[in-house]
Image (cartoon, rainbow, N blue to C red):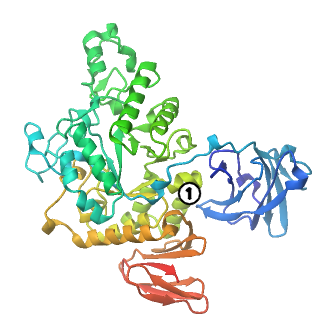
Amino acid sequence: MLLEAVYHRPRLNWSYAYDRQTIHLRLRAKKGDLTEVFAWVGDKYAWDATKELIPMTLFTSDAMFDYWECESIPKLRRLKYGFLLQKGREQIWMTENGFVAERPANPLKLFEYPFLNPADVFTPPAWVKDAVFYQIFPERFANGDPSLNPEGVETWGGTPTPHNFFGGDLQGVIDHLDHLSELGITGIYFTPIFKGTTNHKYDTEDYMMVDPHFGDVQTLKRLVDACHERGIRVLLDAVFNHSGRTFAPFVDVLEKGEASLYKDWFHIREFPLQVTDNIPNYDSFAFEPLMPKLNTEHPEVKAYLLKVAEFWIKEVGLDGWRLDVADEVDHAFWRDFRKVVKAANPEAYILGEIWHESAPWLEGDQFDAVMNYPFTDAVLDFFVHGTVDAEGFSHAIGSQLARYPLQASEVAFNLLDSHDTPRVLTLAGGNKNRVKLAALFQFTFMGTPCIYYGGEIGMDGENDPGCRKCMEWDPAKQDRELFSYYQQLIRIRAEEPALRTGAITFLEAGPQGTKLAYERSLGDDVIMVLINTEETTQTFQLSVEEREWNNLFTGDTYRAERGRLSVKLPGYGYMVLKKV
């Protein structure tokens, strides 16, 4: 055994409460090194009467490591535990203090989960696991009330620039809710709608006011109510890392300098405020002078922003917040933010914008989930760019699953593109087949999938501003076949719980491979997904149960013979098979 590769520590993603009765234990080992692993568990106060060995299963792998997992349901909510590692006939015990040859006689030197306190259980809102989100950039979705148009508004469908306006508004969203319902959407994430000077509104001027170009509070209420009547939840964007340059407290600092009562609301290095060689002498978002960074540790700033967070939930029935530049805000603020938001709406979804590994924010005291850009990168690399093989893709997904507690993975916000990235069809060089395969994995994997507005009808676009085109509402210019495909994906996902919360096992994902097959299982429900990312026909030979398998796209039935299922898939072909 390569013991140097074996790793476990209490808490985080290694030892955590999944619910009020269940504790999950995980252990890492060198890939392919161990043949069996057991958890040696019991109650510290009644060890002899409660101790037991629980077999652990290999739940995922990456390029270097295997990750083993089991669950324990301690009757009295206390758990002492160690591990028995086996490689063939060789075995060794792992305690908190290291490795020993003999079984520990008592629990004193084992790891400990002291007590399963209900208040410590990380419990994201259950509805998110079943949701399908749709991201809307309000200025570019639909112009429903021309009387609100900004000065100099351009004709709908023109070329987007960083600074122009086309008149999209909240009424336009209301007018097109039938489109979202027809597609099967159950959640909308809006980029900022509060008053700002730009078309993107990430430079907030007034956090308590809907931007007049979009409507007013009453319009927002009508929109949220109309969404709720259709079973659609609504998330708004909270830009709390920074404000806009026209935010009243910052204007006061600009005018009064060190004499301003608001000077400590921001991170100012020297007075007077100025910009030299495009670098402001105050902290801002990405050196952008229009977006000064807020001092969220300041009690007045914290009180103000927490009031904002609570107000919009109570005022319009908001279902959650997406948090912009969330990793640059202090953790103490987000802990208080969660308390305030969950008190206002216990089922609110708190979604952080973080582009990298995010475990510190996903322990149940801050966010429910993050925008899952590592997932995005892995999917694009395999299905769209073709820069990794099937094995590399499976390793990337395995690594991502091992990073977080299961409940965090179940509600992760899984996207292929957004207002911050090129559109996926553009990344695919216009190859719609590659987009369809990427979406297939997105919708048959755990987490909540999100469609960026227009993706369902074949909109393309390079990075900002190209990805922020006006929504295409002319049916003759929409890809209706792609729309129908997304409808099918959403329907199949909604009908099959295993696709939302089941375990995933890769059945075929080889080196230099362009074939991918994986299984989603939840109890007796088993679904297999087969994907061919090549342009030419490929044959799948899979070891499966000798029974019939139903194709959820076509209704065709396939039967495994002698424990083998043989299927030919044409170029860019796919199947979603359910065990009958």
Packing grade of label 1 (10 A; few <14, some 14-19, many >=20) is many
Task: Classify 58 as above or below 574.
Answer: above
Q: On the rendered structure, is 98 left or right of 248?
A: right
Please name whichever residue, 60 or 81, is drawn nearer the observer in this view of the structure: 81
Name above or below for residue 299 compared with residue 183.
Answer: above
Image quadrant in which the N terminus is located: bottom right
* Number of marks: 1
Report the side of 396 relative to 324 (left or right).
right
Q: Residue furthest bottom?
A: 561
Q: Indicate the secondary structure of the residue bearing disc 1.
A: helix
Type of the residue with mark 1 = Leu
Q: Residue furthest top?
A: 259
Viewer can see residue 274: yes
The image quarter containing residue 28 is bottom right
Q: Locate residue 271, reporting x and y percent.
A: 33, 12
Q: In the visual, does 49 lie left or right of 111?
A: right
Of residues 246 and 235, which is closer to you in this image? 235
Q: In this view of the protein, which residue sits in the foreground, 452 or 46?
A: 46
Percent of width and height locating residue 468: 23, 50
Can I make out residue 464 in this image?
no
Report the side of 577 relative to 256 (left or right): right
Query: Mark 1 sits on what residue?
Result: 401
| Residue 91: percent from left, percent from top | 84, 62
Which one is in front, 146 or 537?
Answer: 146
Determine the residue positioned at 14% across, 44% down.
Answer: 167
